[in-house]
Amino acid sequence: MSQFWKAWQKRKKTLQEKALHHHADRSMERVADKELSLEVDENIIMIEQELGRCDDLVVRRFRDKRGTDCAIVFLDGMVDRNVISEYIISYLSNPQIPDILPASNELESTDGLRQVIRNILSGSAVLMRDGDNKAYLNNTRGWDRRGVDEPQTESVVRGPRDGFCETLCVNSALVRFRLKDPHLRVRHMVIGRRTQTDVYVMYIEGLAYPPMVREVLARLEKINVDSILESGYIEQLIQDRRWSPFPQLQNTERPDKVVANLLEGKVAILVDGTPAALIAPAVFTQFYQSPEDYYERFYIATLLRFIRAISITIALLLPSLYIAFSSFHPEMIPSRLVIAMAAGRSTVPFPSLVEALIMEVAIEILREASVRLPGPIGPTIGIVGALVVGEAAVTAGLVSPVMVIIVALTTIGSFASPSYSAAISIRMLRFLVMLLAGMFGLYGIMLFLIVLLIHLSSLKSFGVPYMSPFSPLNLKGMKDVFIRAPHHLLRTRPTMFHIQDEIRMREEENREQAGR
Amino acid sequence: MNRQGVSSRQQTFSMWQQTSLITSTLIGVGILTLPRTTSAVLYEAGWMSPVIGSVVALLSIWMIARLSQRFPGMTFVEYSAIVWGSPKYLRMGKWLSLPWILAYLSCMYLATGIVSRVFGEVVVTSVLLDTPLEVIIITMFVLVFILSLHDLDVVARINELLLPLILLPVLIIALASFQKAEWSNLLPLYRASLPSLFKGAFEAIYAFSGYEIMLIFFAYAHENESKVRAGVYGIAITMVIYTLIVVAGIAGFGYEELQRVAWPTLELVKTTKVPGLILERLESAFLAVWVTAVFTTVANAYYAFIYGLRQLFNRGIGFQRIISAIMFVPLYFITLWPQNVVDIFRFNFYFGVFSLVINLGIPFLYLTLLFIRDLGRKQKERNADG
């Protein structure tokens, strides 16, 4: 039986590989790697042939101070026009300047057509001269970009306000600016056959576990897809378990969070064109931990963590607990409350499962709608939805008042999680528990929780068990899980990511501090 | 670093994981009937029987740990062939050890069936009154099946995660019921005869059975961790919990009353009041949390069974997945065999004897065999030297 299974798996694998080969028409590779010629006109014709009919391709011909015919080729809108006119064209045609090369800050030369095409497409201005078979690639990238802005999804009360933007080099600079460590390593990769998206893999050498870094790089290299439009593509292509509802890579828009995670020995993946950076590996604690925890004093941080943990539990279980209590175990509810609840429910024609499903679906619709609506209208819809519809539903006898409280708490609870993608999986699983609670009451909820725990303890993100440090139990790591111990007790980094250099804070220096 | 393909040969269980494997397997359905069964023989001194019973369990787990230390990284199924034969005559060892392995595996298999039946009975009679027994048993099997799809380290981790969930409610119930305990119910301290003391201890031994899973799981214990210590901790924790719950039962109801109730611990829960009256009655909540205790017992035993089968046939995880699905079918019918609760308790008694024989007999037999063979080898060496 198992041999049959193995054979089947093998067949599946070979089929997949075949399919990959079939699609492996890396679009850049289709560009013929011809050598450039000595004639400018011939080169321009070659470029125009490769790019086809591109009306935004600008070819500017001029004659430099020595009288040679020159041409600059670039794509409109992707370059800084001032740089081209001042530092290339007027610089080269000014007879008082003896230089024959442009004064741009990043200048490369090549004689291959493929490289020329690639650079034109990524915003360089290419300078070619008659009698020279080299092309000069000036980095003149300068399209309009969104500035560094406060991250919308992860706001904090205390902490830096800057967030990543869509430009890769700005993002990596935001990380560099916080982490002036010479051991910070940045690996560049190009992923996506057609989009040719730039990707940076960042880690700190001497902190990150080398096999883990290699694994991240290897998985990235294996990606063979035509487009990477957002880091979510990469996240889904390199995660360990494709069918799991839980995010196995963390994503964040906050540079300070990236830096904090790099310092714990993790690997960050920055993708061009998106403000969401990926952090690998991810563990379960991301559901209720925020970078803010380390900025506030530890009592506050610990309290906040507890509150977040409670609110996640509420978001996951409260509606199903209501269903279980009201339809299976009414004897557990205090008698006065049960009378009040029964009075509220007396007009409701549905069983509590249907009642809860109606309200939860309604609130999900409201939430989705308020995300799509233009800025100022969003909150209005929220108020209209939550207050008016809720109130009207109770008055109309569709749902009981307790149900409205429960739905409101559930929704607010799911927003308390600092990680949006983690909260989504909780929101999703909530419906599953509700169905099980409707079938078996508390027993159903327990069934669900056990299956959930089995799944969570079998999950691994890049070799790190998802449930660490709870299991495998790591008492040292527990100092920074539910409670956030004061900084002077967090002398060592968490060991669950196979950290190489454990010491975060040296004892002697600490004593000195205390003496002061 | 993609560890998914790493063979389960790796010895990774920490001591805490071993301890939680033992404790969570031991605590199962036994805890619901323990105050009744122990006080039936020992009257007021019923709490002594878990204490004495734990000594037997300790002896047995000590032998199991010694066996495993002798063959590090090998499960019972693997080293049986070496014990009965020798590296030279492995085939003979395999055939000679087969009856013992089969006895052990069937013990695990039956334990799974009995525990899930008792569990189903309790759930159906006390919380989910309209749900058929079969549905409860099948849902439990589905849970266990989901676990048996995974690798061995997941079993250790899930036990580790669930252990607090098993211990806390029992502790809370035992301690909370002390509020209205009648301490004079525990007096006189001792009036039973010595034979009845052993008889009482035997009643508790059934509640202690389950650690024999370690014949399989000790093979994956981390080398640097002491297996004996893990075994002692595991049984000691269980002993404390059991003693507490028996004391609470006797002090709360008195031994005569205990004989009249089928599930005394559940009655104890019913009479317990929560401070603040957040929940009016606790038994549904207790039973819900108690599902985890039963799950770990059933799942660990079943996993040991499936894993043993897998090693017996020398197959991989794919075989384990398929066979675990198939083996549920006969198990379902075995589970539904007893007609009623009385029948189940009788079944339970016979099974208790059986598992006691297995738990004490197999390790003892193996150790004696090894001892004799060692003597023989030494004799031979001495002869060779001389």
Image (cartoon, rainbow, N blue to C red):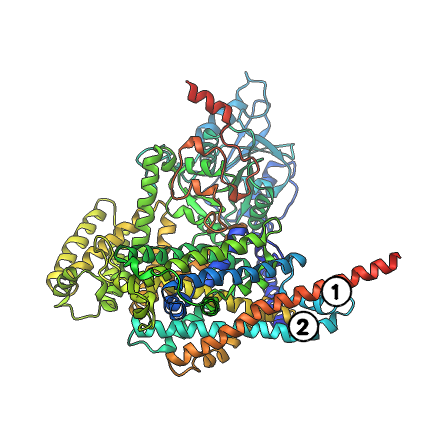
Vertical order, A504 against A18 (above or below)? above
User: Residue B102 vs residue B24: left or right?
Assistant: right
Quadrant of the frame with the C terminus of chain B:
bottom right
Q: Position of residue A59 (x, y in %)?
A: 50, 37
Residue B373: image tag = 1
Q: Which residue was labeled with disc 2?
A: B97
Vertical order, A250 against B27 (above or below)? above
Q: Position of residue B310 (x, y in %)?
A: 60, 69
- Which residue is most to the top? A96
- Which residue is most to the left? A395
Please indicate, yes or no, whether residue A132 appears anywhere in the rendered image.
yes
Please indicate, yes or no, whether residue B321 appears anywhere in the rendered image.
no
Amino acid type, residue under disc 1 in the picture: Arg
**Subunit bearing disc 1:** B
> What residue is rendered at 30% in x and 71% in y?
B126
Q: Position of residue A64 (x, y in %)?
A: 56, 25
> Are dots 2 and 1 on a single chain?
yes
Query: In the rendered structure, which disc, 2 or 1, sits on the residue that comes first in sequence?
Result: 2
Answer few, some or many: residues within 10 Å of disc 1's Cα (few below 14, many 20 plus, some between 14 and 19). some
Report which quarter residue A98 is drawn in: top right
